[in-house]
Amino acid sequence: QVQLSESGGGSVQTGGSLLLSCSYDSFASGCMAWFRQGPGPEREGLVSIDVDRTITYADSVRGRFTVAADTATYNLYLVMNNVKPEDSGMYYCAANPSQGGWTFGGQWRGFDPSWYPYWGQGTQVNVST
């Protein structure tokens, strides 16, 4: 069982910045990711950190968002710069402590919500014009 807890959400104007944090229980290996859920039912993968520390960003946030992991304090951060109204939504961090983002069959599932058994409660971000 891995406990995750997000914080740092709030309201920000277009073009502004926000820092989200995710505190988690320690685990030896696996992958973690940030997801966003907008008005639709799907959770969108934003950034994934694999077991070898490879970082993958979604096209929608590449160049604007940055992920950082502090393994000493078990915190995962998401630095959001130049935010846009479409960045609004509930932000979740997720963890799979059993394996990385690649399946044994060679498929990458780092942005597949079903790949992650553990989730935080989410933190809401609202971007206004």
Image: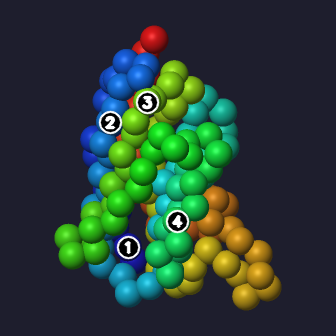
The residues tagged by marks 4 and 3 sit, at their Cα atoms, a distance apart of 20 Å
Q: Decide: marks 1, 3 in contact (CB < 8 A)?
A: no
Q: Decide: marks 4, 3 in contact (CB < 8 A)?
A: no
The residues tagged by marks 2 and 4 sit, at their Cα atoms, a distance apart of 20 Å
The amino acid type found where label 4 is placed reads: Ile
Q: Earlier in the sequence, mark 1 or mark 3?
A: 1
Q: Name the residue that disc number 3 marks.
A: 82
The amino acid type found where label 1 is placed reads: Val
Q: Earlier in the sequence, mark 1 or mark 2?
A: 1
Q: Residues within 10 Å of mark 2 (few under 14, many from 20)?
A: some
Q: Which structural element holds mark 1?
A: loop
The amino acid type found where label 3 is placed reads: Asn
Where does the C terminus fall, quadrant-wise?
top left
The residues tagged by marks 3 and 2 sit, at their Cα atoms, a distance apart of 9 Å
Q: Decide: marks 3, 2 in contact (CB < 8 A)?
A: no
The residues tagged by marks 4 and 1 sit, at their Cα atoms, a distance apart of 21 Å
Could one spot residue 98 in this view of the protein? yes
Q: Name the residue that disc number 1 marks.
A: 2
The residues tagged by marks 1 and 3 sit, at their Cα atoms, a distance apart of 32 Å
Q: Residues within 10 Å of mark 1 (few under 14, many from 20)?
A: some
Q: Residues within 10 Å of mark 4 (few under 14, many from 20)?
A: some
Please identify the quarter of the rendering in which residue 27 is found.
bottom left
The residue furthest top is 129
Q: Earlier in the sequence, mark 4 or mark 1?
A: 1
The residues tagged by marks 1 and 2 sit, at their Cα atoms, a distance apart of 25 Å
Q: Name the residue that disc number 2 marks.
A: 18
The amino acid type found where label 2 is placed reads: Leu
Residue 16: percent from the left, percent from the top?
36, 26
Residue 31: percent from the left, percent from the top?
50, 74
x 40%, y 36%: residue: 81
Q: Earlier in the sequence, mark 2 or mark 4?
A: 2
